[in-house]
Image (tube, rainbow, N blue to C red):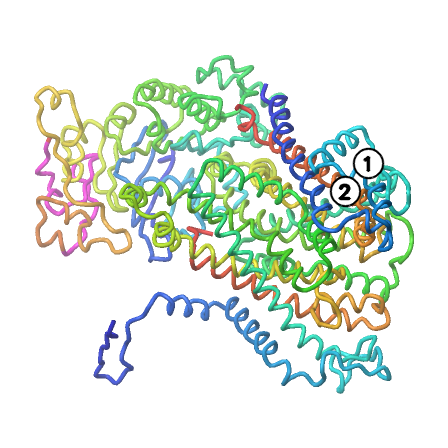
Amino acid sequence: MRGPLLSVRDLRVHYATEVGIVRAVDGVWFEVNEGERVCIVGESGSGKTTVALAIMGLLPRNALVRGEIVYKGRDLLKLSKEELRSIRGREISMVFQDPLTSLNPLLTIGVQCSEPYEEHLKLSRKEALQRAIDMLRKVKIPSPETSVRRYPHTFSGGMRQRTLIAMMTSLKPRLLIADEPFSALDVSLQVGLMQLLSELVRDFNSSLLLITHDLGVAAELCDRVIVMYAGKIVEEADIYTAFERSLHPYTQGLLKSLPTLERVITRSKLEVLRGLPPDLIKPPEGCRFHPRCPFATDVCRRDEPRLVEVERGHKVACWLRMGGIGGAT
Amino acid sequence: MGFGKYVARSITTSIPVLIGTTFVIFSLMYVTGDPVRVILGEFATEEQVARLRAELGLDKPIYVQYFLWLSRVLRGDFGISYMSRLPVMQVILERLPATLMLTGTALVVSLAIGISLGIVAALRQGTKVDTAVSTFVVLFFSMPYFWFATILLWVFASCLRVYPLVGTASPDRLVLPAVALGLPTSAVYAKLMRSNMVEVLHQDYIRTAVAKGLRDRIIIYRHALKNSIIPIVALVMLRIPWLVGGAVITESVFGWPGLGTLLIDSIYRRDFPVVQGICFIIAVLIVISDIVGDLVIALIDPRVRVE
Amino acid sequence: MAPLIRRDLSGEKPQMYEGPLRPLVQKLLRNGKSLFAIVTLLTVLLIALLADVIAPYHYNEQNLGRRLQPPSSRHLFGTDALGRDVFSRVLYGARMTLFLGVTITFFTSLIGITLGLISGYAGGIIDLVVRKVMDVLWAFPIIVLALGLAALLGPSTENLILVLSVLLWIPFARVVRAKVLVIKELPFVKYARAIGMNPVRLIFRHIFPNVLSDIIVLFVLTIPDAMMSSAALSFLGLGVQPPTPEWGAIISDGRPYLFTAPWISAFPGLFLLLVALSFNLLGDVLTDILNPRVGR
């Protein structure tokens, strides 16, 4: 193996808006290895979706991007439009959050699912359609032969998301990015979809980059967790370490606000992170989390902590915890 | 499923409008001016007036007259022209194809230009091309179409000497009036197409298409276009009355032998049956185009069929 | 209310309390398009008002020895078939065209707003009837209807105003009605009705101000429409009667001589285009200011 599949180095994404420059992502470094399942966790506005869009090259026009996103030795940010196009959908693919708006309402399922085969494998419509039917069967869409002639609005939410997943994984991408794929759906559907995603990723030998705000989903699907806050990574660890020995106060706060079985039984109060999400145009000085951190000290308010590896595979960006002490359950 | 039902519903909702419109037109003729006196002149005796009135059925109450007229019309009998003494139907049918040619071609011209410009402007949003299209739009939107037609006539018939001034409704004479009528309208379509396209291009399903790695051309023509066009079809339906009205004047400017010139002449000469007949035909044409427009939308957008 | 004056020691002018009008005007003046429009319109207005003073000749001053002359230093836009100075006629025509545009729009807005308010507020049968009337009227070419009415009533300026006022009200009614329907459901209106407030007073104090910005924009955008329609009807001979100059009528005057004396038809149309363009630009800018859309 030659190294990580994907390597993100010092990624910065700033949006130029009428009210100012929004620093959505401000210096992010991480890697995804082959076959790995990594999860980026954070609240709305943490920059996690922006990272995903940056990798896919789907950022809007007012986005200023700097840094490197190296995939198989090539910097995606420096590729031409054509080169990017051939990678998208084929080697790196993305599943989006809302399956209703993400599917074109005026085209049949068949057409939309055939497109990846037609474009990247140069198959004819007939052949592509056949492959699409097979793929739909694989994601357990009932009667795929007739379903391909239907339109998205005639499908239920769960089926739509399955269709979307089928569409975007049809070419067995090396890296699949999933941006909150279950958030728009009923909780009852989530389990089935998570299993589906897990199976597909395993069968196709793909790497998974899952974006979510739900630590429970992360625990279910991923090997490693990256926690983002206000455009920066605050902690990174494998999933067990994250749950048992998290160091950063934000991560700990997230964990404490999870309704676990134990907490439900003991009826203990869920602890909530106090404060509001930060202003990304003018982020707080020093550590961006300090206004909401119960342990903030002077150095936290002054200087920004760097992401430091405290034990193997476990990194944290916090003045108080870089020694590896202060971990909690 | 829904298609046939959709068509039927479209037709049934149009019928009251058709009846309403034709009734209004019918009544207008009798609101002012007594056609009998117009025909007979000032020196007619009361007896002559009464006789002609009874002959023409003008002494009955207006709604009775309307139903009588309507029942005759539905049988294809539009009455006799006061002036030429020919059946109105015949007179109208002589001229109808010319007007249809003009209006149809103008519509095609306006859509072709309008939609293309709209797409180009949307794809090159914010650039000089976009500004140029905007300028074109606002200029032609404010353009007095009868003046534009007149100037075009002058340029091509007098300066360039390529336009034959007299003649029948032939294709080579068709181009200029069609452009004169179609170009100002295209501005409206260009503007709408541009804003639709810009909005559509920001939609999630376009993002999905890009994420699939599809070519730009396919994204624009297969994904974006269909979604952008629906409001245009609706707008076309709304603008048909304007198009017809514009055709009337354009025909007049270019001497195009269609219903428009006939209408103007008949109005001047108080030839009511002809005027009524033309108005009826116009109303029918408009209703038909409305229905066709609804059908087109149903063809494009599967979501409307479900109800 | 006494103006709030802040004295600044650095010698700047004292600031006065501003009403809502000032920022609007400032925005209009700052935008290139609306600036152009306002300047043009003011110029044309001046021309219309001062036509007597500016015009070198009277609009009906005929000189048969100088018929159909091309533009020259004596006659800037040339002369027409009766030897009249086209430039002067165009200047005087500004008066008529502007007058028609504004007057027709004024009357038509009154009709439309009233019907819209009544229809929206009353609902039920009244609303249904008004809506059906609007549908029927809207479905038919205005020009044809106007032609017919004008022909029947007899061609004259007064009839022109009457006919067009009666045909162009529909957009006003629609806009007002839609707004009223929305506002009607708002809590504060329901409370007002519950305490038995007089409906007329209700309409004027609560509903009307909310619709105002829409009406203003529509008014500005209807003026060119009214001008164009009156010009079209006059073009066909069914509007303003000779010798009164109106741009549409002058264009029509030039038709028989289009090839020999194109200047007669050309110039009034240019002016018409310019004025309509200005109103439309102004209306566009106003729409953007008063109803800002998120994202373009």
- Give the residue furthest to the top: A143
For the N terminus of chain C, give its image quadrant.
bottom left
Residue A6 magenta:
no
Mark 1 element type: loop
Q: In the image, residue C15 lies at what x, y percent?
A: 28, 76
Residue corresponding to mark 2: B276
**Circle 1 chain:** B
Q: Residue at x 14, y 28 (%)?
A: A244
Residue B239's disc is none
| Residue A161, placed above or below residue C36 | above
* Looking at the image, residue C279 lies above or below residue A13: below
**Is residue C59 rendered to the left or right of residue B49?**
left
Q: Is residue C37 left or right of residue C294?
A: right
Q: Is residue C134 left or right of residue B250?
A: left
Element type at marker 2? helix
For this rendering, which residue is in front, A148 or A222?
A: A148
Circle 2 residues within 10 Å: few <14, some 14–19, many ≥20: many
Q: Contact, CB < 8 Å: mark 2 with mark 1?
A: yes
Residue B78 got which mark?
Answer: 1
Q: Which residues are magenta?
A: A302-328
